[in-house]
Amino acid sequence: MPSPPAPYDAIILGAGAAGLMCAAVAGQRGRRVLLIDHAEAPGKKILISGGGRCNFTNIHTAPDRYLSQNPHFARSALSRYTAQDFLALVESHGIAWHEKTLGQLFCDGSARQIVAMLLEECAKGAVELRCGQGVSEVDHADGLFRVLAGGQSATAPALVIATGGPSIPKMGATGFAYELGRRFGLKIVQPRPALVPLTLSGADALFRDLSGVSTPVVARCGKMAFREAALFTHRGLSGPAILQISSYWKHGEDIAIDYLPDHAADWLLIAKRTSPRATVRRVLRHALPERLADALDARLALAGDLGNLSDRALGAAQARLADWRFTPTGSEGFAKAEVTAGGIDTDGLSSRTMESRRLPGLYAIGEAVDVTGWLGGYNFQWAWASARAAGEAL
């Protein structure tokens, strides 16, 4: 006799941004969906994002703002579900929003509104949600996936890995997605912390005295450059510009900082002509926070009035301030990383459906996959877009 049909069409592991979105899309297409999460409540990372207001997308989303071993992989999903598409969903639920700098969109109220919206969308699709259930077993046989979670077993012909990466472990994040991927033949691109503060030591550690000082800069690493604020911390460097560049930084490489990106290349020489009795310290204090100006002045070690300093010495100071080098010793790790770079190798997945090329019925979406966006709502947009792609394929 043929075996009875599975009670579910799809089991989705992980009730974060990607998992909730995928469940809602599949459920509203008439699929019987079971959504499982080990946390006591869904959307925990959504709730803490954007200072509690959820930077839910970015209107400047484009494939070139994502890191991956295959830089073209994200293009298909992102083009089929755009920031404007998600914004339309937000507005359909009456959620007020505002745009901050650089295309970042936030809720006017609370990130809880985004979680409530996603849960309402899941309810429309009759999604069964089980929270507080850790997965103890997952196997595949006879075309069905079997998941044992919280002492209960469930089967379905499709399984979606939406458990994210190991960033922010205090929220319960783990590398479970990678274990599961490997078990079913998917390769893993070495995971590493991304959008993370960088640590300094040695001569650079003197800048720890500036802990709490922030200033707009251009941060560079290799061919990448980001113009945003940098923040000095008791351990090293942070702030949006540093978080952005950290995703591209590799051990042993320098980070270059331009402290005065709005100044002309020969600004010190101009100051010498217009204010010959001023000091380097004084002109730096006009342009930068005092503590930072004083620290940079001490390292430049140019004593005396500008009028008494050679053009060559001032030119060298200008060049150094525009290209001040730090060699980070590392990062603050997954504990402080906003996201994970690396993950399930995209070569093993369909860019259109997120389905495994090796095992039909297996999908991977969101942060679990080797696609990492810039700071500012890009990673949420990848979660929505990749989830939509899988949800429409289930």
Image (tube, rainbow, N blue to C red):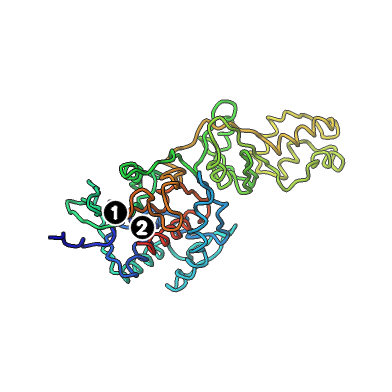
Residue that carries the numbered disc 2 in the rendered image: 19
Q: Judge depth for marks 1 and 2 and give the one in front.
A: 2
Kind of residue at badge 2: Gly
Kind of residue at badge 1: Asp
> Label for residue 379?
none
Q: Residue furthest left?
A: 1
| Residue at left offset 37%, top offset 44% | 186
Give the position of the C terminus as an image quadrant. Answer: bottom left
Could you say where residue 169 lies in the image, as x and y percent from the top left?
Answer: 36, 43
| Residue at left offset 45%, top offset 47% | 346
| Residue at left offset 53%, top offset 48% | 71
Foreground residue, 339 or 351?
351
Residue 104 in the image: above or below residue 236: below
Give the position of the N terminus as an image quadrant. Answer: bottom left
Residue 175 in the image: above or below residue 130: above
* Local crowd size for mark 2, using a 10 Å CA cut-off: few (<14), some (14–19), many (≥20): many
Could you say where residue 344 lies in the image, as x and y percent from the top left?
Answer: 41, 45
Element class at badge 1: strand
Q: Are marks 1 and 2 in contact (CB under 8 Å)?
A: yes
Could you say where residue 76 lies in the image, as x and y percent from the top left?
Answer: 50, 58
Q: Quadrant of residue 288?
A: top right
Residue 259 in the image: above or below residue 101: above
Q: CA distance from mark 1 to mark 2?
A: 9 Å
Foreground residue, 65 or 225?
65
Foreground residue, 265 or 358?
358
Residue that carries the numbered disc 1 in the rendered image: 37
